[in-house]
Image (cartoon, grey):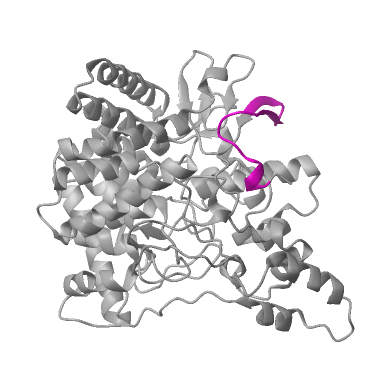
Amino acid sequence: MTTLKSLKIAGLVVLLFFSCTPQKQTEAADETADFYEPWESLGPLFHDVQMAGVFPDSKTFVDCTPKSDPATIASDYLARKDDPDFDLKAFVSANFIPPSEPEIVASREESLKMHLENHWKNLTRKASESDEISTLIPLPGEYVVPGGRFREIYYWDSYFTLIGLGASGRTDLVEAMVDNFAYLIDTVGFIPNGNRTYYLGRSQPPFFASMVNLYAQLTSVEEATIYLPAVQKEYDFWMQGSEYLSPDLPAVNRVVRLSDGTILNRYWDFLDFPRPESHKEDYELAEGLSDQEQKKLYRNLRAGAESGWDYSTRWFQDKADFGSIRTTDMLPVDLNSLMFAVETTLANLYAADGKVQQSDFYSAQADQRKAAIQRLFWDADKGAFTDYIWTENRLSDQLTLAGAYPLYFIVASAQQADEQARVLESDFLLPGGVVTTTIESGQQWDYPNGWAPLQWMTIKGLEHYDKMDLATEIKTRWLRVNDKVYQNTGKMMEKYNVADTTLIAGGGEYPTQDGFGWSNGVALGLMSDNVAY
């Protein structure tokens, strides 16, 4: 098994072959030498605990803190596990401290906005320096967690949390969180999914440049140039391996070369074994497959987690079969719109820093990507943006709310925006806002669920093209369902049922969580007339 300690961003290059398509992987940063990796340190104990379901949620065990040296615990387990009276649950209880998280207490204040403003303190965590053995990666500054089972910082969640913090006047906390992400880029080499060791094989949608732009709007572009090296380093991470691309080697890590020479991005993960935080679920899904098929499945599950849409039929070849997930075969329209935004941000920051040559270079890169998105990701028959399946040289036939990203980042032409807006209204607008996809599958990033970040991207994207009536309608419906659930429960939720607003949203690998960072952030942003990020 490849472990985090064996990964390096530079250096050894490993050739991989998936689906008879030549692909190549360079490896991630060796910044993890002292990090706790329970799936490695605990040996068979880790697998046995997860498969036995000692904790209802697989994530709980990887968040536990060992009471003593993990190797000693693992050795003790091997010596005792076959005893007739051995009790696995009791053994775990004796050797591990479970994670604690303050319960979100229902509270009904004078207004939803007042509740949200007062709730930041409940989701804020102090700088996490600790000598204890833990999967938690220490951060130098304060940060806001989503809530519930999510006890750590999450990458793309945080952009939408920052929107709300900015609307709340918490520029200090915005700066602390952007500093934390710059720290991760500097020390790990990229921003992982979250600040846990089990997330170090992957990132999440690259919103760091957007965070820097938000910070610039709260302060100034000149002040934001301090983050230029971090934005550049993260861009290099996402483009890593592009120098190896050729007609014979069209894919390396997160970059793909098409037959016409166009280079675009996909989601990926450096690792190809079950996600430790979902070990049982992944292991059971892969049962009966060959070793190569298992690795391919695990890679695609991990890449799906990197997308943030974990999970959706968007990634499935067979919409009824979770095991047909093929995230790495797809060039996502939202990811490539984000990469356009990173290139544009680099051009602007270099210009503000007086580096004209670098600014011109990234401006040209952004122009090339914009043209590619307009050309390759546009389905003229459907009048909407969708993903591109690079292994088949064709568009995906499934429309999703990811199609709103080219509007948010002003990539779409005026005509494309007109047509995309019509599709959003006809196919996606429901009583509680806009729905993620039109397919009901039981996956949480499908019908009937609506998610705060996608409401924000859709509403603001429409506003960028002066589709104010539709934007306002979505905003009104979304805030109405937020308030309705809050009045009934005293809480904000991770996701909402936008088809039937009398029901709590469901689906996915875990129960619906409350808290909730990005829902709070988007609601506050939408309530604040002066927020234009």
Q: Nearer the viewer, residue 184 or 306?
A: 184
Residue 454 in view: no
Q: Nearer the viewer, residue 101 or 491?
A: 101
* Number of numbered discs: 0
At a point 47% along the width and 55% down the height, the residue shown is 195
Residue 137 x, y percent position in the rendering = 49, 57
Instruction: Specify the farthest residue to the left.
Output: 530
Q: Does residue 462 appear to the left or right of 272 in the view shown?
A: left
Residue 117, quarter of the rendered image = bottom left
Instruction: Specify the farthest residue to the front.
Output: 131
Q: Quadrant of the C terminus?
A: top left
Residue 432 in view: yes
Instruction: Specify the farthest residue to the bottom.
Output: 85
Q: Is residue 112 above or below residue 244?
A: below
Judge whether residue 134 is colored magenta.
no
Q: Is residue 369 above or below residue 515?
A: above
At a point 57% along the width and 45% down the height, the residue shown is 201
Q: Nearer the viewer, residue 364 or 94?
A: 94
Residue 80, quarter of the rendered image = bottom right
Q: Does residue 446 appear to the left or right of 272 in the view shown?
A: left
Q: Does residue 140 appear to the left or right of 28 in the view shown?
A: left
Q: Is residue 336 above or below residue 523?
A: above
Residue 326 x, y percent position in the rendering = 60, 40
At a point 33% along the width and 33% down the height, the residue shown is 229
Residue 362 x, y percent position in the rendering = 31, 21
Magenta span covers which residues?
A: 3-24
At a point 31% along the width and 39% down the height, the residue shown is 209
Residue 463 x, y percent position in the rendering = 17, 43
Q: Is residue 102 above or below residue 238?
A: below
Judge whether residue 21 is colored magenta.
yes
